[in-house]
Structure formats: structure tokens, C-alpha cells
Image (spheres, rainbow, N blue to C red):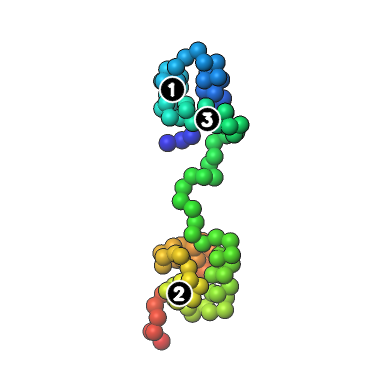
Amino acid sequence: MRPLSYEVRTLIAKAVQAGELPRQVIADAFGCSIHTVNAIASRVNRGISLEPQLHLRGRKQKITGETAAAVLQYYAEHPHATLEEVISALHLDASVPTLSRYLHRHKRSYKKKGGWH
């Protein structure tokens, strides 16, 4: 579901602050849940922006920052390392598919199988 626009959030906040209508009626009028109305009212009371926080959506990446730099450096030094070897050598809290997707995003290739020379 898409977040409410800033304009709609502002209108909901104004309706709640006016205090003339119950929150359930406001929710029905704007086509959202009462929980959304309560969340917007809470944000206004705490002085938090009503802008949608899109950066908080979705699953967070497991390989970021120093860990990402360490993975890329390890692959530069050990180009024939398998994914399992990298995970064990760097003590990563990531699975083999996660590391594979990370390397694919950074256009790095890796050894698929071990011991086949």
C-alpha cells in the first residue's frame, strides 16, 4: 500500500487538531484506518514531520559499511575464494545467497565450486 501524500496527512492533522469530529469519522472520510489517524496525531503532538518515511521501508541490507569494504577487499586479495570461505573468514552474519546477491550488485564474480581444478 502506498503512503498517504503529505497534503492528505496535513489535512488529517488539521481535522484532528480542530477536534470537531471523532477520529473514526476522520479515518472514514480520508479512506484510511483509525490507526493511521492516531499515528499522524501522535507525530504532530511530538513535533515530528508528516513527510512519508520511505527510507524506513523494506528489509535492511546485512552487508553494509565496514563489512562491505571488508568483503570487497577480501575478494581483491583472494579472487578464488568460495562464498562459504568468505563468510567463515570474515565471520559474516549473512547467508550464501545474501553474499551472492551483494557481489552481483557490485559486479564481482566469485568461484562457484571448490576443489575442481
Q: Earlier in the sequence, mark 2 or mark 1?
A: 1
Q: Are marks 2 and 1 in contact (CB under 8 Å)?
A: no
Label 1 Cα neighbours within 10 Å, binned few <14 / some 14-19 / many ≥20: some
Residue pictured at 39% horizontal, 84% vertical: 115
**From the viewer's perspective, is 77 left or right of 99?**
right
Residue pictured at 50% horizontal, 66% vertical: 103
Q: Look at the image and tell me in which quarter the N terminus lies.
A: top left
**From the viewer's perspective, is 1 left or right of 72?**
left
**From the viewer's perspective, is 25 left or right of 5?**
left
Q: Earlier in the sequence, mark 3 or mark 1?
A: 1
Label 3 Cα neighbours within 10 Å, binned few <14 / some 14-19 / many ≥20: few
Amino acid type indicated by mark 3 = Ser
Number of the label disc, if any, that sits on residue 88: 2
Closer to the camera: disc 3 or disc 1? 3
Q: Could you tell me how far apart the alpha carbons at marks 3 and 2 are, in whole angstroms? A: 45 Å
Under circle 1, the secondary element is helix
The residue wearing badge 3 is 42
Q: Could you tell me how far apart the alpha carbons at marks 3 and 1 are, in whole angstroms? A: 15 Å
The residue wearing badge 1 is 27
Q: In this picture, is 74 found above or below 52?
A: below
Under circle 3, the secondary element is helix
The single residue placed furthest to the bottom in the displayed view is 117
Q: Could you tell me how far apart the alpha carbons at marks 2 and 1 are, in whole angstroms? A: 51 Å
Q: Relative to the observer, which residue lies in front, 28 or 103?
A: 28
Q: In this picture, is 85 found above or below 40?
A: below
Q: Position of residue 86 (x, y in %)?
A: 48, 74
Q: In this picture, is 25 found above or below 82?
A: above
Amino acid type indicated by mark 2 = Ser
Amino acid type indicated by mark 1 = Ala
